[in-house]
Amino acid sequence: MSTAQEIVKAVGGPGNIQSLTHCATRLRFQLIDSSGVKVEEVESIKGVMGAVPQAGNRFQVIMGGAVQNAYNDINALPEMANVGQPSDEEIKAAARAGGVRGKFAWVDSFFEFLSDSFRPILGALLGASLFITFMSLMVTLGVIENWNLPDVTLPPDWAFINLMWQSVFVFLPLMVAYNASKKLGADPWVGFSIMALVMLPGFADLGKNVAAYDAEVFGKSIKLIDIFGVPLTIFDYGSQVFSPLLMAGLLGPLYKLFKKLIPENLQLIFVPFLSFIIMLPLTAFLIAPVGVYAGAGLAGALQWINQWPFIFAILIPLTYPFMVPLGLH
């Protein structure tokens, strides 16, 4: 008997399963009657890392990184053919059933937007993070110098290994821009291309121009250059996520507006073109720097609050879960 078959049998068989979904690590069963399900029996199945009974005949089976395969294997069982799977709207409605997300639609929409912007790249982020862990371990063991310090130059072989995680994290804004734009109904490649402007080597080279100058914002030195009399912030936008999220938030409605105004046979060319005309300069001059200025302002505010360590210790855990997905941490 396969692991999938054992799990189905342990939760009461297909006839006891009303629906099945999954998150990043858990199978989420909605059962008809969970009173007869034994946690010990489920946890004894090979590959199962734990089981969590919940109210309302809900039952979670912890699978870790194997959850997607387990979910697919269970759904592929012939006996599961007649088990109804909830629609996306039903799943979201269940998540909104209680708490603040059920009372305020905009809160639910915001977190759904964040979730759909990051969920597709979660595997890449977790995989790349192990390279960072490995490099940090090498520093701890004294094998290499601390590669995170600006004045440290690694030997070529270790420098190459250190590039492996950067292939994901440096270009994270492009991945987020793609997913977030797609979520809001815009062409994801248009969103990708708009965000790519501020990550071009030529954009960074503007900061080396003799016309570039330094300015201080919230105590942080920022490189600026005037373009047609308007100051342009030159910054390394690698790993930033607030900027692509904000960009997509404006691109989505704009893209839909152009699709309504432009005849269908002209949309392929002119909807992206007009989106570029508006969003490329808007992103470079305003949207992208907002993340930089917000981060600098937050750092200054936290430094000021740190005068009262007790308040600081309470504030950081409360705000950190919101700062991380916005790239302000």
Image (cartoon, rainbow, N blue to C red):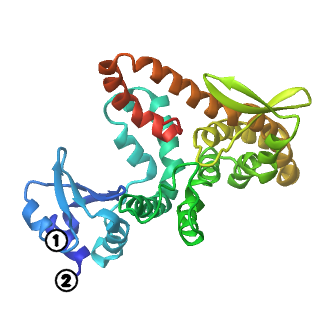
Give above or below for 217 relative to 96: above
Q: Is residue 274 above or below residue 295?
A: below
Residue 50 placement (x, y as % from top left): 18, 60
Amino acid residing under circle 1: Lys
233 vs 257, nearest the viewer: 233
Q: Quadrant of residue 311?
A: top left
Q: Nearer the viewer, mark 2 or mark 1?
A: 2
Rate crowding at label 1 as few (under 14), some (14 to 19) or many (20 or more) other CA atoms within 10 Å. some
Image quadrant assignment for residue 292:
top right
- Nearest the camera: 15 or 154? 154
Residue at 77%, 46% in the rendered image: 204
Residue topped by disc 2 = 1
Q: What separation in Å lies between label 2 and label 1 (alpha carbons)?
A: 10 Å
Q: Is residue 102 above or below residue 1?
A: above
Q: Which numbered marker is on residue 9?
A: 1
Find residue 198 and report its image quarter.
Answer: top right
Q: Would you say residue 38 is visible in this rendering?
A: no
Q: Amino acid at mark 2?
A: Met
Report helix, strand or loop for mark 2: loop
Residue at 57 percent of width and 59 percent of height: 166
Measuring from the top left, give residue 131's x and y in whole percent.
Answer: 46, 64
Instruction: Check contact, mark 2 vs mark 1: CB within 8 A.
Output: yes
Please tell me whether mark 1 sits on a helix, a strand or a loop.
helix
